[in-house]
Amino acid sequence: MDTAAVSVPAHSDRVIFFDTTLRDGEQSPGATLNGEEKLVIAKQLARLGVDVIEAGFPFASPGDFEAVHKIAEVVGTETGPIICGLARATKQDIDAAAAAVKPAVRKRIHTFIATSDIHLEFKLRKTRAEVLAIAEEMVTYARSLVEDVEFSPEDAGRSDPEFLYQVLERAIAAGATTVNIPDTVGYTTPEEFGALIRGIKENVPNIDQAVISVHCHNDLGLAVANSLAAIKNGARQVESTINGIGERAGNAALEEMVMALYVRRKLFNPMFGRPADSEVPLCNIDAQQIYKTSRLVSNLTGMLVQPNKAIVGANAFAHESGIHQDGVLKHKLTYEIMDAQSIGLSENLIILGKHSGRNAFRTRLKELGFELSEQDLNKAFLRFKELADKKKEISDWDLEAIVNDEVRSYPQAFQLEHVQVSCGDHELPTATVRLLMPDGQELTDAAVGTGPVDAVYKAINRLVDVPNELIEFSVQSVTAGIDAIGEVTIRLRHENRVFSGHAANTDIIVASAQAYTNALNRLHFTLASAPRQSPQSATHSLETPSRAGV
């Protein structure tokens, strides 16, 4: 392919948002998603307006390949985002990525190799000259398969800048249209990282032929700050995840960067050659989809959003101080720099009740951004009717919770058929559960615990012989009031792997039992399937894929 024939858009007038929730975000312990869940998130990311979806690491496993391929087919439309697959700098990885993203109208291969001396010595066991040659060869090969190639020098934040300049120059000459600078271990500070990007712009002769991207990790809590410093110094693509999930302490949070660009646009506008007062958005993100996307990702991954999380946390727009409350009541801008409605957060009550019809229910779901199949709509409608019998007023948050819970695609080897508890201050907490087993049998057992939830879990464990350790149990109220839906998220560990389960119900004991059963199902199917080829901590060999570290 003639690389010179393809023009590279500079995108100097806006920020490109590259979302890696489905790749790096899924690498959070316990956040494993199945193919259907990935597709649901990918569809929402498209509604959110991300420019690029890194849908996964196709060579890692057949399941990853199929998920990326399906997303490319369904979401990678003419008007949809670029669909990207990650690949180490090996032909096998690149071939898998190219095949996986092939159905997308706009497709990208993202290939990487480490460039820091510590990675070269202890992980790759290669010289700088060897890495230079591999980077050039593999970018050339990827470019022969697709027109859009992104190259990342892994651990760029700790690499020798002079060597980094050489690698980037070779990669761009070989056909890379985007060069991504990862702070892989979250080591740098904003001043250092900004200087690194500035140095690249000044010392890589052909840098104007590629978009500069950044991928920052949050080990020191500086991922968003580092990304914004990079934008100030010329980066025009930022790689991020919803809620900032990802390896270790996570990645730069998309919602935080979007709102920083929005709230402080007078500061950022001149960096894009605009008048400070320009109202033209600095990115393509539809901010009103932020809250919905955050909730969806939290529910499907089991990664809870802490209450004080910027932008999407439960306390982000709450005011406890009397002075603050008084100020906000007089004028919101006294203590709020943005409106909750700007991220799609509202207190609207749906005008639906137990006598409402299916068509009204479907219409409201569409207004909230849910597009369900007929089967999923029927399941959600039944849950809505059950809830309407129990609650006088149903909020959009309630509706969102039951829909997300009902249409979640957990594989079901064990199905909870019945749960009953007996407890009190002078009683032994006792639970009876009935499960439908994989062979079709219905089994019932009972157990005594330190509390009703403990008793339920012990009873389930008597029926399901899958050793595990419960490491986290969390209950959150979706709305205020004694009749609020309770969302339960649990995480359990088996042989150093973490599995999450989530459920929502007005009865938190039932929700607890369902969440635990969901997590056990995930564990069961993982043990029953072939071992996943995990791209974690491997060398640059062809035999063992490494967990992508960019």
Image: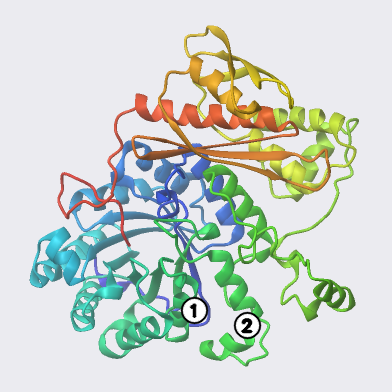
The answer to which of 408 and 69 lies nearer the viewer is 408
Secondary structure under badge 1?
helix
The quadrant in which the C terminus is found is bottom left
Contact between marks 2 and 1 (CB within 8 A): the answer is no
Q: Is residue 374 visible?
A: no
Residue 454: which disc?
none
Question: In the image, residue 271 lies at what x, y percent?
Answer: 52, 89
Q: Amino acid at mark 1?
A: Leu
Residue 484 horizontal side relative to residue 97, left or right: right
The answer to which of 104 and 126 lies nearer the viewer is 126
What's the distance in space between the residues labelled 2 and 1, CA to CA?
11 Å
Q: Amino acid at mark 2?
A: Arg
**Number of marks in the image?**
2
Vertically, is 111 above or below 493? below
Q: Residue at x 52, y 45 (%)?
A: 301
Question: In the image, residue 304 lies at what x, y percent?
Answer: 58, 50
Which residue was labeled with disc 2? Answer: 264
Which residue was labeled with disc 1? Answer: 228
Secondary structure under badge 2?
loop
Question: In the image, residue 406 lies at what x, y percent?
Answer: 65, 33
The quadrant in which the N terminus is found is bottom left
Vertically, is 262 above or below 422? below
Q: Residue at x 68, y 90 (%)?
A: 277
10 Å crowding of disc 2: few (<14), some (14-19), many (20+):
few
Residue 19 horizontal side relative to residue 405, left or right: left
Residue 319 horizontal side relative to residue 197, left or right: right
Q: Residue at x 54, y 58 (%)?
A: 242
Q: Residue at x 46, y 31 (%)?
A: 522
Question: In the image, residue 133 lies at what x, y percent?
Answer: 12, 68
* Earlier residue among tags 2 and 1: 1
